[in-house]
Image: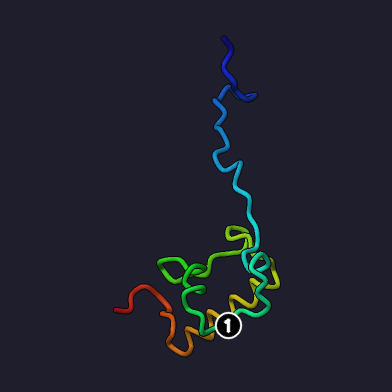
Amino acid sequence: MKKSKNKKGFKRKKNLNRNTNKYCKFTAEGVEQIDYKDIEVLKKYITETGKIIPSRITGTKSHFQTQLTTAIKRARFLALLPFTDQHS
């Protein structure tokens, strides 16, 4: 039986993320504006260290990604969200 190898003789890795369909959750829910006061929604788009998750990972459209980043930055400025994870 022949194993699947590429040109250089290395084994090929299976693509594990092949069936992940990304879609914009804001378009699916019919959201027109993202509000900076809706902290529960904003927390889903921030990592544990406080970084904003990019749209290529979340699947949000560019229009909503810009609204999302401005809403997160406004919430940080008003101390509704922390800037980093080091705040206790």
Q: Residue at x 63, y 50 (%)?
A: 21
Residue nearest the viewer, comparing 60 with 13:
60
- The amino acid pointed to by label 1 is Asp
Q: Residue at x 50, y 84 (%)?
A: 75
Find residue 70 and report its image quarter: bottom right
Q: Residue at x 56, y 33 (%)?
A: 14
- Locate residue 71, reporting x and y percent: 57, 81
Q: Is residue 13 above or below residue 30?
A: above
- Mark 1: which secondary structure? loop
Residue nearest the viewer, comparing 16 with 23:
23
Identity of the residue furthest to the front in this view: 29
Q: Is residue 5 above or below residue 32?
A: above
Could you tell whether 86 is left or right of 47 in the image?
left
What's the coloring here?
A: rainbow
- Tell me the residue that label 1 is attached to: 35
- Locate residue 44, reporting x and y percent: 49, 67
Q: Is residue 31 above or below residue 61?
A: below
- Locate residue 18, reporting x and y percent: 61, 41
Identity of the residue furthest to the top in this view: 1
Could you tell whether 80 is left or right of 62 in the image?
left
Find residue 10 and report its image quarter: top right
